[in-house]
Each structure stands twice: as structure tokens, then as C-alpha cells.
Image (cartoon, rainbow, N blue to C red):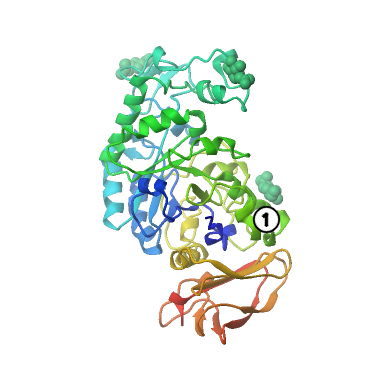
Amino acid sequence: MFYPLAVVPFSFLLSCVQAIPTSSHSLVSRSPHNSKTAIASLWAWDWRGVQDECPFVASAGYGYVQVSTSTEHIRGPQWWTDYQVVSYDIISKRGNRAEFKSMIDACHNVGVKVIVDVVINHMTALDSGTGIAGHNFTHYDYPGIYDYNDFHHCGTPGDEIHNFQNETQLETCQLVNLADLNTESERVRKRLAQHANDLIGLGADGLRIDAAKHISPASINNILSRLSRPVYITQEIVDTTGKWIALHTAAGKVQEFRYAWTLKSAFITDGISSLRDLNDRGLINSNGANVFVASHDTERLNSTLTYQSNHRAYILAHVFTESDAGAPSGGHCSGDGPTSGWECQHRWPEVTGMLDFYNRVGESKMNHWVTGTNQQIAFGRGSIGYVVINNDGSIWDATFSTSLPDGKYCDIVGGLSTAEHCPGMTITVTHGSFTASVPAYHAIALHVGRKH
Ligand SMILES: *[C@@H]1O[C@H](CO)[C@@H](O)[C@H](O)[C@H]1NC(C)=O
Ligand SMILES: *[C@@H]1O[C@H](CO)[C@@H](O)[C@H](O)[C@H]1NC(C)=O
Ligand SMILES: *[C@@H]1O[C@H](CO)[C@@H](O)[C@H](O)[C@H]1NC(C)=O
């Protein structure tokens, strides 16, 4: 089963929000049980910022936050310094071990689970240096942790990956000169599992495995088999064909980049009416996929929709206008707008409105699909919700048939309603139908939990 439309509805605004599918499947045993499955990605936020944000994250209906790497890394202002590991001490630009633990405890206290980014494929790309906690290293020597024999030396020129279609090279050669751990060795597997278990001991509920395409599936499975308890696993595997992600589905979820690329082409060029057959495009099915509209990498690379793509009047900050730019300092939002350099997409009322929709409709089947132009679609989700998306430059005036019970509904794209107040449009469903004028580049969404 594939339920992509659960998150398509306002996808052009859902940047940095991901969804964990809920369907029953053996892989789900790796997911902590949680009825709320959306993840707010607070990438590059410091631990205090995440801690302060968790109450909002909880109240908006997210089940998880996904946070940056936690381990000692090389020095420098660029974002990618986080991904060059110097030691497994929990100290990074995001904070120290005590702050990390305090963040996890605080998020748990409000019912939010925490997924931590982990780098287990490699150490650094430098010849030598000093990490931010003061540990000295050379390319293949991390005193007290690894020495030359703990790394792959694949034998290609520069020990680099030259052919990205060759699995041996992908898994045993260096990616952009990053010293590639010999994850086939017992000693390395044991050390990596020890690190993962340290995070789990501190309360981590999930791991996002960076560069998973560059670790053999057998090694990932072996390392995960040593975890002290099952946690949610999602693997970063950038893959245009599906060949590489298919190798990794036994270890956990895979990030389905093709989903995000498909959304971008639909919203920008092909027309969103083309998303009708999204189930039939050969993507990893929703039991195994971790889907998103944009990630920290795709935003910088402009390969998916980004917070800068939508046509609406959001303030266009320029956080990642340079592809090496570091994160804005700290991590804090206040109100709904961007502060301290963060866009805070997870707080946008349209996003939290659609999260409310997503949580409410669950896996209800799609029905009543209609299109206007090729940039206008509308569909129901069982007898629980209905959404209209107008990604076109003119108003969409139409009458929509639904399976909704009759009554007055509040459009939640306009903001979450209370019993007394509907900040958006009020829509009346009569004999299962309603008529609406949806402005250009707007959407409306109704569900039975927000009747008015
Ligand atoms: C790391 O190297 C620097 C200079 O190269 C030296 O001053 C420092 O004492 C070294 N630190 C450790 C912990 O060995
Ligand atoms: C893949 O790369 C390895 C290492 O360079 C090489 O030995 C092997 O022949 C290559 N395999 C294929 C199918 O090209
Ligand atoms: C990002 O991609 C979109 C759509 O392909 C394009 O319109 C836009 O100019 C690109 N932005 C940058 C900064 O390259």
C-alpha cells in the first residue's frame, strides 16, 4: 500500500516535514509505537533550541523531531563539518552531552520522540586536525578509537569512488575523501554499535543513518542487530532508480528522494493532476519509505521544492543561499514567523493545519478525485476529510462532491479553528457537496474534527 496523498495535499508548503507511515508491516516493529507519525526536522538546531521547541512540536501534532548529529566533529563554520566525525564524544556545535540528554528528556516529557542523525560510514576528509572537543587526529588515525586497519583502502586512484554504479566502490571506497570505515570488521561494527547504544541509552528513539548507500546492507544489518532495543531506523540513500534503496529495506526505512523530486516536477512543470498515479510509479511503498518534500540537502541543492518555491507571500529569507552556508546560530522560533534566521516551516499555520488533517484522516482511502486544469486537484479521504489544491494562477470555482457528513466546516489551511473561532473560510457541506472559490495558489482542507 502506498498513501502518498496523505502528505501531498499541501506539499508545496510542507518543507522539512516528513512522515513515518503507519501501516502494519514487519519493519514497523522497529518504530516506536506512536499514533503521531509526522517528523519535524529541526536540522542544525542546537539542543537547547530543540528542547524549547518540543512543546510547540507536541501541541501541533508532530510525533517526532529529527535532530542533527551529536558527536565531536571537525572545526569550521560550514554545515558539513557536522558530518566529519572526530570522536564519539557527545559534543558538537549543537551542545554537550548534558544538554543533549536534557533535550531528549524534555521532548519525551511532552510526548515527542527524538530521531538522531548518525554518521557511521566514515570519519573525516582531512589529513589531520583537531576536533571541537580537542581531540587530535590524522586521516586514518583517531587515537583511542580507530587506526589505519579500521578503514577501507579500496585500491582505486585516491581510494575514491569513481563509478557510482559499482556497488563495491560505493561501499568500500571514499566518498569525497572521507576516510571510509571498514564496516565489515568486527572491531568497527562493535565500536559503531557501542556509539548507537550510547545514544539509545540517552533516550534516542530513532536513528537517521547518514550516507547509508555507502555502507553494505549486510554491515548495517549486523550493526543494528547489536542495538540494545529496537528503534526507528531511516536511511539516507539518494537514488534515482530504486536499485540501491531496494538493497536496504531490510534494515529499516529508506528516505524516498524520488517522492520529493516527483512533487517538485508536478508543482513546477508537469501539473499536479499527474500525481493521481503516484502509487503506480514504482516508488518504495509507504511501509518502507520515509517521505519528505525537502531535506536540508535538497533545499540547498534546489533539487526539490523549497521554502522559497511557493508562490505565496511568505517572507523569503536566504538561509541557505550559499550551498556551504552554516546554520543560523542556535535554533528558536517565536510566533509563526522566521526569527534568528530560521524559516520555521514546521510552525506555518498551513503546515500545522495540514498536519492536523494528516493525523485525522490516517489511512482513509482516497476518493472523489477531480481535476480542474492540470494544476488543480481535489479529493476526499474516506468520509473524514476533503482537500482542494489550486496550484494555478486563476481562481478555481467549482462544486465538489464528497463523502463528508453535512454541516459547517472550517478550512484548516487558514489556521486551526476552535469551537468559537474559524480563522479561515467556513464551508458548508449540503447533501455531501460544497461549492467554493479557491484563490490562485491556495488550498482548502476540511475534516470532521474541525466542524464549525
Ligand atoms: C593537539 O595538537 C596540538 C598542536 O598540534 C597540541 O598543542 C595539543 O596538545 C594536542 N592535544 C592533545 C589532546 O594531544
Ligand atoms: C567495481 O569496482 C571494483 C573496484 O574498483 C572492481 O574491482 C570491479 O571489477 C568493478 N566491478 C564492475 C562490475 O565493474
Ligand atoms: C530552483 O528551481 C526552480 C525550478 O526548477 C527554478 O525556477 C529556480 O530558479 C531555481 N532556483 C535557484 C536559486 O536555482
Q: Amino acid at mark 1?
A: Ala
| Left or right of residue 295, residue 399 in this image | right
Q: Nearer the viewer, residue 161 or 438?
A: 161
The answer to whether one can see residue 372 in this image is yes
- Residue 65 on image: x %, y %: 39, 50
| Left or right of residue 428, residue 192 in this image | left
Q: Residue at x 72, y 54 (%)?
A: 269
Q: Residues within 10 Å of mark 1 (few under 14, many from 20)?
A: some
Determine the image quadrant of residue 34. bottom left
Identify whether 136 is placed above or below 292.
Answer: above
Q: Residue at x 33, y 20 (%)?
A: 145
Q: Secondary structure at mark 1?
A: helix
Q: Residue at x 41, y 54 (%)?
A: 24
The answer to whether one can see residue 75 in this image is no
Q: Nearer the viewer, residue 416 or 405?
A: 405
How many discs mark residues in the rendered view? 1
Determine the image quadrant of residue 428. bottom right
- Residue 116 on image: x %, y %: 38, 42
Label 1 CB, ligand 3: below 8 Å?
no
Q: Which residue is under mark 1? A: 266
Identify whether 209 is placed above or below 215.
Answer: below
Q: Nearer the viewer, residue 131 or 268?
A: 268
- Residue 391 on image: x %, y %: 67, 64
Identify whether 156 is placed above or below 166.
Answer: above
- Residue 241 on image: x %, y %: 63, 39
Q: Nearer the viewer, residue 258 or 174?
A: 258
Looking at the rendering, the quadrant in which ligand 2 lies is top right
